[in-house]
Image (cartoon, rainbow, N blue to C red):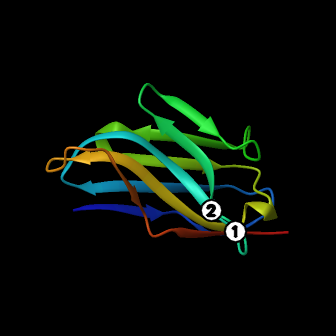
Amino acid sequence: QVQLVESGGGLVSAGGSLRLSCAAAGTIASIKSMGWYRQAPGKQRESVATHSLGYITKYADSVKGRFTISRDNAKNTVYLQMNSLKPEDTGVYYCTAQLITEWSQAWDDYWGQGTQVTVSS
């Protein structure tokens, strides 16, 4: 069993900052990538940032220069530092990981339950 546990969401004024954390726990053999998606009310879930093996990072155009994704491989944890937040950043942020467990023979995608981020104008 694998669980992704997110923390760090909350309410912040425009221009403020938040830091999200997501820890993967369980019988994990290896993690290929970790990342963050978000879903705003009435909109589809979209990729915000991903961190892959080899320290390859990718960002949505809307967050480039404001958000930074980082990863602690020893702790199986990914972080999302969000600066200069805008009201349009409001949504539920989901952590995701592509990993292989000690019992499986294929890479699988896992999701956290989400953490609410609300940016007031």
Look at the image and tell me whether residue 58 can be seen: yes
- Of the two numbered discs 1 and 2 in the rendering, the one whose residue sits closer to the viewer: 2
Give whichever of 110, 77 is nearer the camera. Answer: 110
At horizontal 85% and vertical 69% (from top left) the residue drawn is 121
Q: Secondary structure at mark 2?
A: loop
At horizontal 79% and vertical 62% (from top left) the residue drawn is 88
- Picture coordinates of residue 56 (x, y %)? 52, 29
| Residue reaching furthest to the top | 54
At horizontal 75% and vertical 56% (from top left) the residue drawn is 85
Give whichever of 45, 95 is nearer the camera. Answer: 45
Q: Which residue is mark 1?
A: 40
Q: Secondary structure at mark 1?
A: loop
| Residue reaching furthest to the right | 121
Q: Which residue is mark 2?
A: 45
- Number of other residues with Cα within 10 Å of mark 1, as a class: few under 14, some 14 to 19, many 20 or more: some
Look at the image and tell me whether residue 76 can be seen: no
Amino acid beneath label 2: Arg
- Number of other residues with Cα within 10 Å of mark 2, as a class: few under 14, some 14 to 19, many 20 or more: some
